[in-house]
Image (cartoon, rainbow, N blue to C red):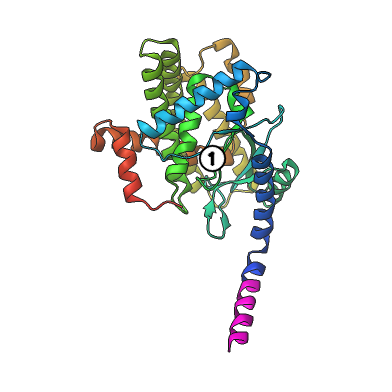
């Protein structure tokens, strides 16, 4: 009986691994990339007493520690050992993310993984593998996007290091990043990436604003500069939410008798109109460079679906913060931690 039970367990395990073979291989590859980063990360406590290590970088480490302390003590984010080590990328990108969306629908393709659930993007530590994934979906007729990523969260499962690319950010963007990723380590709901990313984006931005105001003062250049960037970002995001909605409506109402070339022409025309509309909303501060900037934008459905993943519901979070929590971000975070089960 025990031997039969053992055989049964082995067969179930083999069947599971066979069914999820591609996910298992991908997981091993990603695990190897993560291990390489963690293995080669240096302890910040040791670097801080190294006389040959640059003082300017030590100051950045201290600044990040200050942001992290603020996020944990003033916002109620979970205390972790993150950002107590440092990984030097030597000027090289470290992670690439592929996004895909159908040609005539703004809906991110979802990659499914055992335990972790579904994700509207797929990350790779190897750029060539990322390109192959992108090309696979392009051959299937999807719009795709391949982006470099300079930060991610392991959701508290590992000790996330400071990456050297983070140190290139100004005070506001760095605070935003650290608080964003710390939000993931605090709360991450399975199979709801849009909620997770919109929440982290919201907490990152509001938290960074609060941090800069407390750390530098509300009349400081750091605070005022970041506040101005948030205002400009809001102009862009409000515009994009509206335009993405109308574009999706156009897709839904496309005449089914149209030839594929005609559909593509309508799509291209509408996306060009979205680009041109950016000139009318006072988004660009330098009008002489606006045209070049617009021409450099590569809008497609993968970009739009990625925008939704990170920014679609930001206004709802802001409304919730004001109406239910009287602007108290810490209370809002505490309520979410109680309401939702985290991975």
Residue 301 appearing in the image: yes
Membership of 229 in magenta stretch: no
Q: Quadrant of the N terminus?
A: bottom right
The residue beneath circle 1 is 306
Judge whether 118 appears above or below 212 on screen. Answer: below
Q: Residue at x 64, y 54 (%)?
A: 27
Query: Outermost residue, bottom direction?
Result: 1
Helix, strand or loop: magenta stretch: helix
Judge whether 252 appears above or below 201 on screen. Answer: below
For label 1, the crowd category at 10 Å Cα-Cα, with few meaning under 14, some 14 to 19 and many 20 or more, is many
Q: Residue at x 34, y 40 (%)?
A: 333
**Occupied quadrant, residue 59:** top right
Total number of numbered labels? 1
The stretch of residues the image draws in magenta is 1-15
Judge whether 214 appears above or below 136 on screen. Answer: above
Compare residues 327 and 187 and report the one nearer the observer: 187
């Amino acid at each position: 009986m025990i031997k039969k039970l053992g055989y049964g367990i082995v067969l179930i395990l083999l069947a599971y691994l066979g069914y999820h073979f591609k996910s298992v291989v991908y997981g091993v590859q990603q695990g190897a990339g993560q291990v390489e980063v963690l293995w080669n990360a240096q302890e910040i406590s040791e670097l801080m007493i190294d006389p040959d290590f640059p003082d300017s970088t030590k100051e950045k480490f201290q600044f990040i520690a200050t942001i992290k302390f603020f996020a944990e003590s003033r916002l109620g984010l979970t205390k972790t050992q993150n950002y107590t080590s440092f990984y030097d990328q030597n000027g090289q990108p470290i992670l690439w993310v592929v996004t895909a969306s159908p040609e005539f629908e703004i809906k991110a393709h979802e990659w499914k993984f055992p335990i972790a659930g579904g994700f509207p993007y797929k990350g790779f530590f190897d750029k060539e593998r990322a390109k192959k994934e992108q090309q696979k979906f392009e051959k299937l007729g999807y719009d795709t996007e391949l982006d470099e990523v300079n930060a991610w969260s392991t959701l508290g499962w590992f000790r996330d290091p400071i990456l050297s690319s983070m140190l290139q950010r100004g005070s506001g963007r760095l605070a935003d990043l650290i608080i964003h990723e710390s939000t993931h380590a605090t709360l991450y709901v399975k199979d709801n990436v849009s909620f997770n990313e919109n929440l982290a984006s919201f907490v990152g931005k509001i938290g960074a604003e609060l941090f800069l105001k407390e750390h530098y003062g509300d009349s400081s250049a750091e605070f005022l500069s970041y506040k101005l960037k948030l205002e400009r970002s809001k102009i862009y995001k409000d515009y994009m939410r509206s335009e993405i909605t109308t574009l999706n409506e156009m897709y839904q109402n496309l005449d089914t008798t149209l030839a594929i070339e005609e559909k593509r022409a309508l799509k291209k025309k509408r996306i060009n109109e979205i680009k041109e509309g950016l000139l009318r909303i006072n988004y660009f501060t330098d009008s002489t460079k606006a045209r070049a900037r617009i021409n450099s934008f590569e809008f497609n459905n993968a970009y739009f679906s990625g925008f939704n993943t990170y920014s679609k519901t930001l206004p709802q979070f802001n409304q919730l913060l004001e109406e239910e929590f009287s602007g108290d971000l810490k209370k809002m975070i505490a309520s979410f931690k109680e309401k939702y089960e985290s991975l």
